[in-house]
Image (tube, helix red, strand yellow):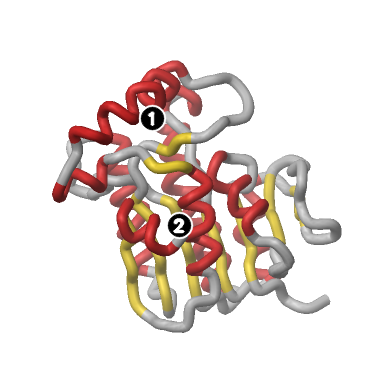
Amino acid sequence: MASPDILLIGATGLVGRGVVAAMDDRPLTILARRVVDGAPDGHALVAPPERWADIIAAERPATLICCLGTTIRQAGSQAAFRAVDHDLVLAAARGARLGGARQMIVVSSVGASAKSRNFYLCTKGEMEAGLRALDFARLDILRPGLLTGTREGTPRLGEGIAMMAAPFTNALLHGTLRRYRSIPAATVARAIVRLAGQGDSGVHVHENDAIRALS
């Protein structure tokens, strides 16, 4: 079996589902902890997260796309949140590097910084720093604002309220604050598909305006 060009983790989330839909006929392998609706026939792998790094290394994708993301409330604790948004992301990335992946694309968050006093943003920043240290030939970090779209599962009350207020909030955010505007998850997904397989090297950080331009 030939090695996949692109392997995706986080396919069940808002952005991940958009990536699957936007890939069209491009070869895509999905790795998830459960069966993913709409996954390409013959290109879906199901395994517990603790096995993902080994599976990714064995699959040898050229590009790893990571759309993993949860919230502290959804995870149940700060430790559980960090286990997904930091530890699992980096474990998967190490597997990709071991398998010879040239590129990684990851969805982070606007404001991510390892120096942030906000636990969520600090965790995202530390995750980004960990990925930089792995020295992919090309690393694409997407830092969108509030993601809008229809989520599966139990609605997140805070996000629901924020989404309703987004049109009014966006109108107040200008200049450098534009990066904090909300953005449709489908727009982020299309940008990811455009980035997959890009030949240039280096670390590339994409915030709202750049994401919209790519999509």
In the rendered image, residue 132, in percent from the top left (x then y), is placed at: 34, 67
Q: Say whether residue 56 is left or right of residue 142.
A: right
Task: Using residue 107 as the reference point, say whether residue 150 is left or right of it.
Answer: right
Nearer to us in this view, 165 or 180: 165
Nearer to us in this view, 61 or 169: 169
**Which element is circle 2 on?**
strand
Residue 214 image position (x, y, % from top left): 42, 63
- Residue type beneath disc 1: Gln
- Image x and y of residue 34, in percent: 74, 40
The quadrant where residue 6 appears: bottom right
**Residue at the image position 50 percent from the left and 62 percent from the top:** 93
Q: Taking 186 as reference, is 131 above or below it?
A: below
Q: Which residue is mark 2?
A: 106
Residue 78, numbered circle: 1
Indicate the position of residue 129 as horizontal and vertical percent values.
Answer: 31, 59
Residue placed at 52% from the left, 34% from the top?
149
What's the distance in space between the residues labelled 1 and 2, CA to CA? 21 Å
Query: What is the crowding at mark 2: few (fewer than 14 residues within 10 Å), some, or many (at least 20)?
Result: many
Disc 1 residue crowd, few under 14, some 14–19, many 20+, Cα 10 Å? some
Q: On screen, 110 above or below 94?
A: above
Residue type at tag 2 = Val
In front of the other: 117 or 147: 147
Residue at left 58%, top 20%? 154
Tell me which corner region of the image, top left, top right, bottom left or bottom right, holds residue 139: bottom left
Q: In screen coordinates, is 22 left or right of 112?
A: right
Element class at badge 1: helix
Say which label, 1 or 2, has the lower sequence index: 1
Query: Which residue is pictured at 76% across the width and 46% down the height?
Result: 38
- The N terminus, quarter of image: bottom right
Mark 1 touches mark 2? (CB < 8 Å): no
